[in-house]
Image (cartoon, rainbow, N blue to C red):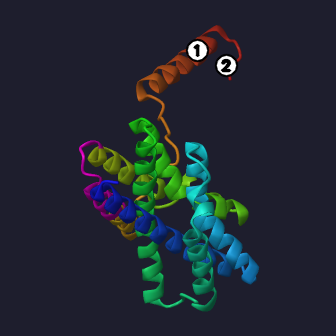
């Protein structure tokens, strides 16, 4: 195997495993907020840490999901559950570290998902979609298990949007022959956008209200006034 390709694959695996640990910890934190026991911690950590990658690998149909063939994935997911179980993460700096972990996980998993789709000889649009699925899939499964509306459906600070930006950057730079740079840029920009969105409360619009054109309203108002005047002159009952 080409040493450069082998090195990049190792980097990709490290980034993927870092995302597993980060999201497993977040799954454990969600279990704590729901007052679950240690079994709940482990299950939510595994779903949160491995869910996106399993969905991605199942859709790509490139053999069994890597989370089931590489024991490091499940081991790190359980480690994240144990960390979240014993570390309360209640202080200000603990909360900030969780926000940073979440932001880095979005960018790292988006990069991994997009690159794996490209390695499977799929198109750029599919690669972007796989990057998003990898980044948000585990969190969506976790939220469903807790009977919450998944964060990707809106009402949050650019969660899926950050994954979209990272996936597009990874695809573009990988197509230009710079996958390693793409991973770094995708991780950094995804994390930065997510952190800025949290800091300033950036969200996408939840609905668009189209105001009634003022000209049309004026025309209708004048038409109603004219009908009332005509009815008054003729002695008829005024229209409603």
Q: Residues within 10 Å of mark 2 (few under 14, many from 20)?
A: some
In this figure, which residue is indicated by the disc labeled 1? Answer: 227
Magenta span covers which residues?
175-190
**Residue 8 location in percent, x, y?**
33, 59
* Left or right of 2, for residue 210: right
Q: Which residue is drawn at 62% across and 85% down?
A: 82
The tally of labels here is: 2
**Residue 101 location in percent, x, y?**
44, 74
In this figure, which residue is indicated by the disc labeled 2? Answer: 238
* Left or right of 87, for residue 179: left
69 or 207: nearer the viewer? 69
Mark 1, secondary structure of its residue:
helix
82 or 238: nearer the viewer? 82
Asked if the residues shown at circle 1 and circle 2 are in contact, with their CB atoms under 8 angstroms apart, the answer is yes
**Residue 92 location in percent, x, y?**
45, 88
Q: Residue furthest top?
A: 234
């Amino acid at each position: 195997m080409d040493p450069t390709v082998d090195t990049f694959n190792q980097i990709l695996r490290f980034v993927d495993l870092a995302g597993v640990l980060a999201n497993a910890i977040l799954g454990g934190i969600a279990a704590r907020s729901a007052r679950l026991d240690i079994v709940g911690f482990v299950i939510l950590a595994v779903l949160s840490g491995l869910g996106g990658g399993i969905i991605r690998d199942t859709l790509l149909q490139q053999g069994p999901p890597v989370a089931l063939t590489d024991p490091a994935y499940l081991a790190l997911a359980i480690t994240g559950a144990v960390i979240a179980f014993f570390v309360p993460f209640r202080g200000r700096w603990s909360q900030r570290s969780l926000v940073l972990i979440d932001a880095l996980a979005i960018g790292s998993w988006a990069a991994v998902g997009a690159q794996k789709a490209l390695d499977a000889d799929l198109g750029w649009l599919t690669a972007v979609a796989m990057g998003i699925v990898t980044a948000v899939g585990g969190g969506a499964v976790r939220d469903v298990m807790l009977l919450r509306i998944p964060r990707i459906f809106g009402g949050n600070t650019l969660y899926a949007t950050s994954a979209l930006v990272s996936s597009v950057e990874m695809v573009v730079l990988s197509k230009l022959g710079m996958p390693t740079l793409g991973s770094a840029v995708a991780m950094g920009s995804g994390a930065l956008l997510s952190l800025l969105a949290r800091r300033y409360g950036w969200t996408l619009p939840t609905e668009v209200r189209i105001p009634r054109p003022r000209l049309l309203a004026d025309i209708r108002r004048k038409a109603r006034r004219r009908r009332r005047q005509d009815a008054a002159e003729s002695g008829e009952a005024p229209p409603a």
